[in-house]
Amino acid sequence: MLSYLLACHFQSEDINKYELLLNESIQKYPNYVYNYTDLGEFYLKMGKRELGKNLIREGLSHVKLIYKNDAINDYDDDPLDIFQFVNERITGVFMMEDTYNSLNELLQK
C-alpha cells in the first residue's frame, strides 16, 4: 500500500518514479484496483494504448462493490470506518458507479 501512496506523491514530480512505484505496487498488491488503473491511464497518456487498456481492464476486474449513484444515501457511510476508507480511497475495490463507468469509457476510445 505504501508504494501506491508514494506513487501518488511522485505523480507530478517524477514520472519515472511514479511508473516504477505503480509497477511495484502491482507486484505487491495484485488484487487492488487503483494501482492498475492509474498506471493504465498513465500509459494511455504516453501513447501505449493496448498496455494501458489491459491494465485498466485488469484493475476493474478487482472491483468488489460499486456504489450506485442514485442510491448513495442507502449505504452505511461511516467516515471513521478505516476499512471502508482504505477500500474506497486507496485500494479502489469499492468505487462509485461514475468512476467505474468513466474507467470503462477509456476502454472504448
Image (cartoon, helix red, strand yellow):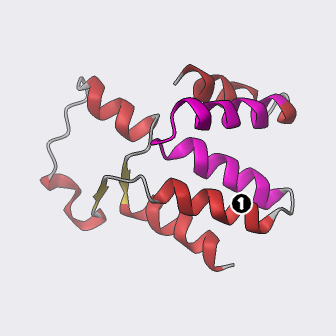
Q: Position of residue 100 (x, y in %)?
A: 45, 62
Find disc 1 in the rendering and name its residue. 52
Residue type highlighted by circle 1: Gly
Look at the magenta stretch and give its main secondary structure: helix
Percent coordinates x, y for residue 20 in the rendering: 77, 32
Q: Position of residue 19 (x, y in %)?
A: 77, 37
Q: Residue at x 65, y 22 (%)?
A: 6
Q: What residue lies at 59% left-to-right and 25% top-to-bottom?
A: 5
Q: Quadrant of the C terminus?
A: bottom right
Measured along the vertical axis of the image, is residue 27 above or below residue 43?
above
Asked if 82 appears above or below 32 in the picture, the reply is: above
Q: Quadrant of residue 10?
A: top right
Q: Position of residue 26 (x, y in %)?
A: 60, 38
Say which element carries label 1: helix
Given residues 89 and 43, the one toward you in this image is 43
State left or right for residue 39 relative to residue 47: left
Characterize the local packing of mark 1: few (<14), some (14-19) or many (20 or more) Cα atoms within 10 angstroms.
many
Q: Any magenta on residue 43? A: yes
- What's the residue at 19%, 32% (across, down)? 78
Q: Is residue 68 magenta?
A: no
37 left or right, relative to 33: right
Depth check, front residue: 27 or 16:
27
With 40 as the anchor, is 104 left or right in this view?
left
Point 14% across, 42% down: residue: 76
- Residue stretch rendered in magenta on the structure: 17-45
The outermost residue toward the bottom is 108
